[in-house]
Amino acid sequence: MMTYIVFILSVIFVVSFVGFSSKPSPIYGGLVLIVSGGVGCGIIMNFGGSFLGLMVFLIYLGGMLVVFGYTTAMATEQYPEVWVSNTTVMGVFLLGLLMEVMLVLYVLKSEEVGVVFEFSGVGDWAIYDTGDSGVFSEEIMGVAALYSYGAWVVIVTGWSLFVGVLVILEVTRGD
Amino acid sequence: MNPLIFTTILMTVLLGTMIVMMSSHWLMIWIGFEMNLLAIIPILMKKYNPRTMEASTKYFLTQATASMLLMMAIIINLMHSGQWTITKIFNPTASIIMTSALAMKLGLTPFHFWVPEVTQGISLTSGLILLTWQKLAPMSILYQISPSINLNILLTMAVLSILVGGWGGLNQTQLRKIMAYSSIAHMGWMTAVLVYNPTLTMLNMLIYIMMTLTMFMLFIHSSSTTTLSLSHTWNKTPLTTTLILITLLSMGGLPPLSGFMPKWMIIQELTKNSSIILPTLMAIMALLNLYFYMRLTYSTSLTMFPSTNNMKMKWQFETKRITLLPPLIVMSSLLLPLTPMLSILD
């Protein structure tokens, strides 16, 4: 099972995306987002990015999702929609689930999957521990490069986030 | 809105487009598009009524979907070429997805449905920014990937846009919707020649922006958003009726005016590439556009449109000062003799 752990985690990832895209109330959407964030963290860690996985948990789940949860709690409705309360939500959820199941069966059964890029069976999903990058781990070097060669990216992203906050406050302020 | 915040947000819109136009890394281009989208939302929502909110929401949803498609195309391109530089796209699927994403951002058929509704719901100045500045960024990306765009898809979208832009504008009396359909048609003309000679796309974009800027300035000057209120301009500022006449005829592409230049060049370029039916069709469908511009000029400058008697003796506050209106009007009507200068654009 451990060789196919990335495949299994990616299936859970897609299913949780289907879970919140079928639009229950934001509270339940946030719940499933937490699950998908945790699973995404697991996928990143399996590729060797322990630092980035920690980033996902800390900043994404612990920062942004918590703020999202608090604001949604402030704007709660009396009868929030669950996946089973509304036929439309249930229908969309089941449809997404069905599509994912069919895709998984396609990947498992056939020798080669060629949608836009090719997989050859489930073997492609396994991560082998070859190609060791030596003493330095790749993703720490990536983060270091972000702050040295990629200074412009940091400036642009930082400004985007700042303007994002400005825009959100401006839009909610109203008159 | 607080002037400091408004300036910051406006500058961020400019910064977003600049980042899109000057980046060489696909990820930065995507970030530029997102920054542009995020910052223009409060500008669209300057007045707080349900129409602007609905328009901003529609704009946000369609543009966010287009950004997602763009990201998908970027990633597929990455998987097939292994690099992030802006050159032609190395995979036909990615090229088709990216063309669709940029068509959604521009408002080409079949993704044109948001343009009239969003333009109608926002104020005239916001509509101006939406229809002119926001077209620059996607067009610059289309220009850069033009060697690898699927010709069939792009030409289909272009011809359908000219059709929809012409036919859709026929039943409109609201000026903003008329300008929106005009924008759809002009985008169609621009993308039709993109694969053959991208310089002409840029020429058409330039002249279209000048003409649309002029039209919007004239509308803002007379504070009119419907054909009916535009037809009262003879009473307020008689000079602007003539200017509206000239600029509208220029937008329709009539020969002695500068709006004829891009259409002429585009038809010439298309016939040089041995396609004759296509430019004929495009020229005929541009007549639909001309018809509703002519209807506007008829009701505004050529006749005294029927109105109640108290409308014939209007008083108004002090005339607004619109910057740059005279040079804009001159540029949008008298540039045709400068056509030989096109050779410097190479």
Image (spheres, coloured by chain):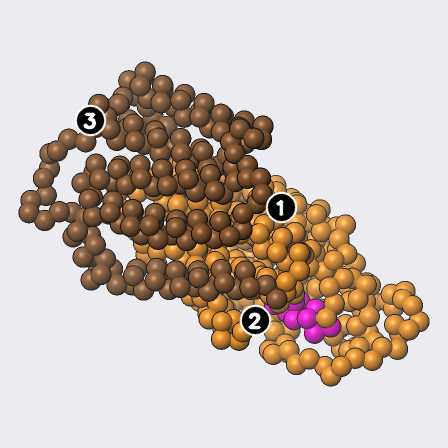
Chain colours: A brown, B orange
Instruction: Answer few, some or many: residues within 10 Å of disc 3's Cα (few below 14, many 20 plus, some between 14 and 19).
Output: few
Which residue is the extreme one toward the left? A135
What is the magenta range? B213-222
The amino acid pointed to by label 2 is Met
The residue where tag 1 is placed is B113
Say above or below: B325 vs B105: below
Report, in whole angstroms, how far the alpha carbon at label 2 lies from the one at label 3. Answer: 56 Å
Report, in whole angstroms, how far the alpha carbon at label 1 lies from the one at label 2. Answer: 29 Å
The residue where tag 3 is placed is A2
Q: Residue drawn 25% across and 40% down?
A: A44
Sequence-wise, the earlier of marks 1 and 2 is 2
Determine if the magenta segment contains residue B218: yes
Q: Residue drawn 26% across and 23% down?
A: A122
Say above or below: B62 vs B130: above
In the rendered structure, find residue B1 and report the number of the disc placed on it: 2
Which element carries disc 1, helix, strand or loop?
A: loop
Toward which corner of the image does residue B259 lie, by quadrant?
bottom right
Question: Which of the pair B115/A45 is nearer the observer?
Answer: A45
Residue B209, given in percent of the width and then of the height, sits at: 57, 64
Residue B261, given in percent of the width and then of the height, sits at: 59, 62
Disc 3 is attached to a residue of which chain? A
Say above or below: B335 vs B144: below
Quarter containing the N terminus of chain B: bottom right
Question: Which of the pair B53/B58 is nearer the observer?
Answer: B53
Determine if the magenta segment contains residue B93: no
Label the magenta part by its dominant secondary structure: helix
